[in-house]
Amino acid sequence: MNGCMAETKSGVVRGYEREGIREYLGIPYARPPVGELRLKRAVPYAWEGIYDAAGYGEPSVQYENGELLGSEDCLTLNIRTPLTGEKLPVLVYIHGGGFNTGSASLPLYDGKAFARQGIVYVSMQYRLNVWGFYDFTVYPAGKDFDSNCGLSDQILAMRWIHENIEAFGGDPDRVTIAGESAGGTSMLNMIGAPGAKGTFRQAIISSAVPNAYFTHAQSKEDMDLFLEGMGWEEGDVAKLKTVDAYAVQKGNTYMSDRHQYKNPGFFLQSPVLDDLLPQRPLDAVREGAAAGIKIMIGTNRHEGSMFVRPEKTIFPNSWEMIEEMFRKNGHEDAFAAVRDYYEPRNGRKINGIGLGFIDFATDYAFQVPAVKLARAQKKYGDVWMYRFDFASDFMTEIGLLAGHAMELPYVFHKKDFGWMAEEQKRPQKDVVNALADKMHASWVEFVKNGDPMQGKWPQYEDHDGVGKVCIYDAETHIEDLDRRELMKLWGDMKFYGGG
């Protein structure tokens, strides 16, 4: 590395020193997926001269908080590094958002706190929703399109990082990948996709949905809703070659609002099984796909609080929906036991929803498959499990508790971000800040040394549902977490093919 110039295999990149670190923002790792490349997999890109990496690139096209934003030309990555050092550990972060929304340019994900700890931090943009994860190959008029375009973006970005990170002071043999929600699920994409093999050595899997993978036939369930929302017939899929990039958000929103009522327990559009991803990642892990890869994996205590809603729910919000979900998947005989396990908790209402339904969604989508993943990986590599249990006063007031994504400002040490900024005004400020120090330090230690607490956090060993788990709370501690009853209740049931 020469000053703020980095010579990559794609071309020379100019970075900038800001706030005591170096920044290279908006570096294109693939050709813009527009025109003939719309709904085609990512294609490598190179440039002549010097690429001025002064600012973030555009996020992917999306409809977020009532606003259409982003661009199809979105395939860029961002690198922040310490001012000095070579062969430094690397952290690659893939943002979440249900494969539907989100951006690497959000201030939450800037990674400056990691760079100041001697880590080369990388984040990436990838295509989302219709342009990234819809599967139009299920229709005759869509045979010219590719499946898993967003996944192809992630794979190409990982290969670019592996080939070029040394030019930014990073060690390609010391790469940790991390992500939360769809980003956590993307960790499984990288483990299950042969094209990403060898590009990382460690993974932090936060609040992943390990069963959110479709066959082409299953994908068509959501694709048909999209067409209905657009007012299209199957043959109209050909219009995707020329339609305005924002116009399709009408169908995307329609599908998102209705898919749960069509197939309770079904997931929003996610990667499909194809040549890029030959099998479900959980099955791949069971067969040793992540052999030798060190993994931290965890969930939040109340993941479902963000997703179970009185209307337009993302997971089932009634026993009628759950009973239909079990019936559609051939588990009618198990329904009564599940209802009896969760129903007593419905006496407590969170934003009009019984806590039992929130816990059901948490366990179904996040906690139970995370335990299954840890069990599977333990045969092949080192595993640490955590759970984020801290429900601050503010989060309890607004009904999210220790909900989905609530841990992120703690991990990124962003005490001035969003709900963390609100916490600074409250009596719990010192507790909140101490937890942020603890969580961030754990991530840093894992990235640097492959051990999140220097031996004080034992690896996960599952004994019929009992295992040591780091509980991040007002008093962070290691607990022999007893999930025997929970794991026995869910057993080896599979829903929509995953399990």
Image (cartoon, grey):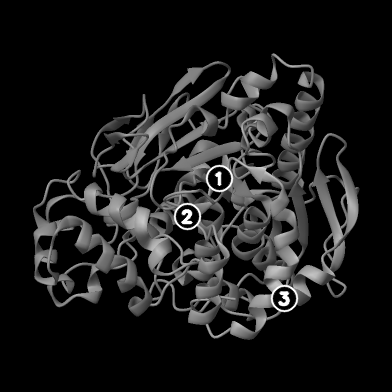
Can you give x and y, in whole percent of width and height, for residue 484 in the image?
84, 71
Give 157 or 393, whichever is nearer the viewer. 393
Could you tell me which residue is drawn at 78 percent across and 57 percent down?
384
User: What amino acid is at disc 2?
Assistant: Ile
- Corner quadrant of residue 232: bottom left
Can residue 299 be seen? no
Residue assigned mark 3: 337
Do labels 1 and 2 touch, CB within 8 Å? yes
Q: 310 left or right of 381?
A: left
Instruction: Find disc 1 in the rendering and name its residue.
Output: 306
What residue is pinned by disc 2? Answer: 314
Residue depicted at x 20% and y 67%: 145
Q: Is residue 457 visible?
A: yes
**For numbered disc 3, what is the local secondary structure?**
helix
> Which SS class for mark 1?
helix
Give residue 148's quadrant in the image: bottom left
